[in-house]
Amino acid sequence: MIIRNNIPGINATRNKGISEGKMKKSLEKLSSGYRINRAGDDAAGLAISELMRNQIRGLDQAMRNCNDGISFTNTGDGALAEVHSMLSRMKTLAVQSANGTYTTQARMNLDKERQKLLDEIDRIGETSHFAGIQLFGHDGSNKQPIPGEVAGDDVVFQVGSSASEILKMERYYVGSANLNLDGTSFESLNDANAAVPLIEEAIEAVADVRATFGAASNRLEHAYNNLYVTNENMNAAEGQIRDTDMAEEFTEFTKDNIIYQSANAMAAQANSTVELVLNLLQ
């Protein structure tokens, strides 16, 4: 029996410290919900999960970008729907003016409405914006009035978490000159008849531009759905690596708690054993 070194007490205290450390880590994991709270918990898992987290953040923003793009295309389509309505009205006026039952003054009155409709088409083409971004190209003085002429600068939508995942949509000029309607007139029967095919071409050109908006909108919707599924799967994979398995961790905590209490009791027993030496000195 020795008193200089209480080996049983040291051993019990060491085991108690180990169990206490494990309990603290288990409590941290249980309270935070994460299996990995620091690099020391799982260095490789932390590195992989951080890469996944960055990708997930990119996917989240890409989904928001897709929604913004869909809103952009819907806004453009809505503006062109009104242009279509005005072109249909212009065709009606042209056919009406081409009828031989109208006087010159009546045709001049019909032509006034044509002018106002073209002014409104020009206004829509020049002032239609989405969050400060022009929906249609601005007509340049050096450009020929070609129906459905491409403006030259595409609208680019970022639809993924990497730089290469983009969707480009052509931007078109929309105006009376570009639709080849600035030279039309309803003031005579011949002018009205000549305007009808031009208006029909303009209606077709606007329909082509609307089709571009519609195609882009449909693609953006599919891109959003794909991003949503990818995001869900990435979150599940990241959770498998980083999240705490609560049932498993609570089992470990309970085991370490029992060992800790046992070690604490044994440390007290080891100290009381040394006290028996005092009985020999009495």
Image (spheres, grey):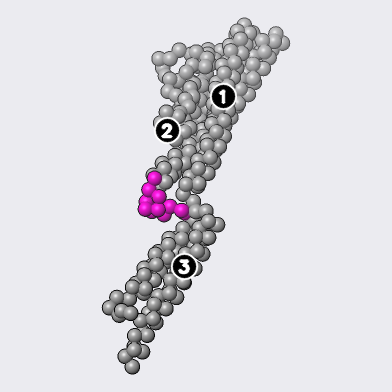
Residue 150 visible in the shown view: yes
Quadrant where the image shows the N terminus: bottom left
Task: Identify the residue position indicated by label 3 in the image.
Answer: 259
Q: Which residue is mark 1?
A: 215
Badge 1: residue crowd in 10 Å (few <14, some 14–19, many ≥20): some
For marks 2 and 3, the one nearer the N-term is 2
Residue type at numbered disc 1: Ala
- The residue that appears at 55% across and 27% down in the rendered structure is 219
- Amino acid type, mark 3: Ile
Q: Position of residue 65 (x, y in %)?
A: 49, 36
Tell me how far mark 1 sits from mark 3, CA to CA. Answer: 66 Å
Find the magenta span and give its range: 34-44
Query: Eyeballing the image, is 44 above or below 278?
Result: above
Circle on res. 162 = 2
- Between 122 and 254, the residue placed more toward the observer is 254
- SS class of the residue under badge 1? helix
Asked whether 13 or 218 is in front, the reply is 13
